[in-house]
Amino acid sequence: MQTDLVRIGTRGSALALAQAAETRARLMAAHNFPEEAFEIVVISTTGDRIQDRALSEAGGKGLFTKELEEALYDGRIDFAVHSSKDMPTFLPDGLEISCFLEREDVRDVFIGGKVKRLQDLPQGAKLGTSSLRRQALALRLRPDLDVQVFRGNVQTRLRKLEAGEVDGTMLALAGLKRLKLEQVATEIMDGDSFPPALGQGAICIESRIGDERVAKLLAPIHHAATGAELECERAFLGALDGSCRTPIAGLAQVEGDRISFRGMILTPDGREMHEISAEGAVADAQAIGREAGEEIRAVAGETFFQSWS
Ligand SMILES: NCc1[nH]cc(CCC(=O)O)c1CC(=O)O
């Protein structure tokens, strides 16, 4: 048994651990394995250690994946469990995303201290978020808000809200559900005016290209529709060159053999916005995302991306 031990790599935050446990539970059910067949290997990343500034300033998305990828190369873990939203657009050589679990609710929520809804915040109230997308979308609805950089894991943010450091904050409903904390949400944002981050709500698994044992292990827990949605969304991001300094939102949705996509780019102050919609066969998911990215890029013009960076 020991030689067959499956080593699951994860970050150490409560959300990451919940995602690793969910992956393990699905594998146990799919293969009829006991819990002892798995070891959850916790790996601390640079992103976890930086708490005092926005991640876009510190070097971006790779900060949450680098140390896990080193563990994959070294063979200390068999695969790494991630939030798709936090994955860089391009992966290092030899590694791939080999599996997507079925997507959770993709929506964002508002969590208010004294008021329940974002729109009910008093003039000039403090909204805590480090996401440029949430900042831009919130400022579109409420240009008067005072957006504060607000880092840390979900629990830390909720503590800061309770302590009155801000008047409200925003989080992904998916993460709250995985932590069994969805009851703290005071408003579920409407997906039309508040589209999610690309990849939001989807757990993905990164592994070594060509690892047949891991491929066989993961095949039964892969969710094809989520996979197509994420292929489309990641292609959109790739065409935009996924800069962390650009607020980007969007969502692909599979229905039967069709996929629809809606994407949005904004200026950080939320004043300027470009939107795109596309639709087609699921088999063309990637091309649909890429073409939507190229089109929105052309419509916005290169100056759009340079105007604030
Ligand atoms: N950047 C942190 C992060 N990465 C994934 C989630 C939520 C879970 C998900 O989207 O799958 C969160 C927290 C949040 O944005 O509320």
Image: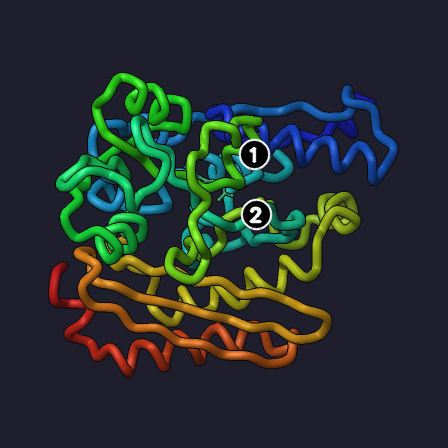
> Which residue is painted at 87% across and 33% down in the image?
32
Q: How is the image coloured?
A: rainbow
Does label 1 point to a residue whose CB lies under 8 Å from ligand 1?
Answer: no
Q: Nearer the viewer, residue 268 or 68?
A: 268
Q: Nearer the viewer, residue 233 or 114?
A: 114
Q: Which residue is mark 2?
A: 105
Residue 188 seen in the figure: yes
Point out residue 209 in the picture as x, y percentages from the top left corner.
62, 53
Q: Nearer the viewer, residue 165 or 53?
A: 165
Q: Quadrant of residue 37?
A: top right
Q: CA distance from mark 2 to mark 1?
A: 9 Å
Q: Amino acid at mark 2?
A: Asp
Looking at the rendered structure, the secondary structure element under dot 2 is loop
Residue 206 visible to an observer of this rendering: no
Q: Quadrant of ligand 1?
A: top left
Q: Are marks 2 and 1 in contact (CB under 8 Å)?
A: yes
- Quadrant location, the N terminus: top right
Residue 177 numbered tag? 1
Q: Quadrant of the C terminus?
A: bottom left
**Element type where label 1 sits in the image:** helix
How many numbered marks, from 0 up? 2
